[in-house]
């Protein structure tokens, strides 16, 4: 029977490795705000009827998808350095 070492499940520090960290959950939340704002704007502009739920849901889901895609594929900022202080 061989002894296997335990798995390393710790996440590396992005500032030490130089990798870019993406935030799809944050993008989904920002997309939700974008979708709700777009739905309210389209309702006030008269494009969407106030009682029609399907177009409103489509606009909100489209906003969430745009937010997730933006958070995954948009240019990211460089990680903050750990020794700047």
Image (cartoon, grey):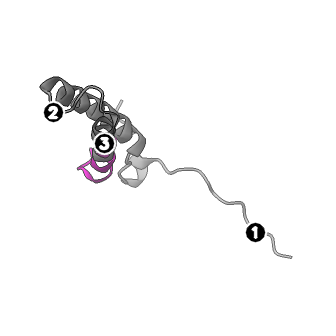
Q: Are marks 1 and 3 in contact (CB under 8 Å)?
A: no
The CA span between labels 2 and 3 is: 13 Å
- Secondary structure of the residue carrying tag 2 is loop
- The answer to whether 46 appears left or right of 2 in the picture is left
- Secondary structure of the residue carrying tag 3 is helix
Give the residue displayed 27% in from the left and 46% down from the top. 66
User: Quick check: is 33 in the magenta stretch?
Assistant: no
Q: Which residues are magenta?
A: 68-81
Q: Nearer the viewer, residue 39 or 9?
A: 39
Give the residue displayed 15% in from the left and 33% down from the top. 47
Which of the 4 image quarters holds residue 5? Answer: bottom right
Q: Report the residue marked by disc 3.
A: 58
Q: Report the residue marked by disc 1.
A: 4
Q: Report the residue marked by disc 2.
A: 47
Residue 73, horizontal then vertical, whole percent: 28, 53
Residue 60, horizontal then vertical, whole percent: 31, 37
| Residue 43 appearing in the image | yes
């Amino acid at each position: 029977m061989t002894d296997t070492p335990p798995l390393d499940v710790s996440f590396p520090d992005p500032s030490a490795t130089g990798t870019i960290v993406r935030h799809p959950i944050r993008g989904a939340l920002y997309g939700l705000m974008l979708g709700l704002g777009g739905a309210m704007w389209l309702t006030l502009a008269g494009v969407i009827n106030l009682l029609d739920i399907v177009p409103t849901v489509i606009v909100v889901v489209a906003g969430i998808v745009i937010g997730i895609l933006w958070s995954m594929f948009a240019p990211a900022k460089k990680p903050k350095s750990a020794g700047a202080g």
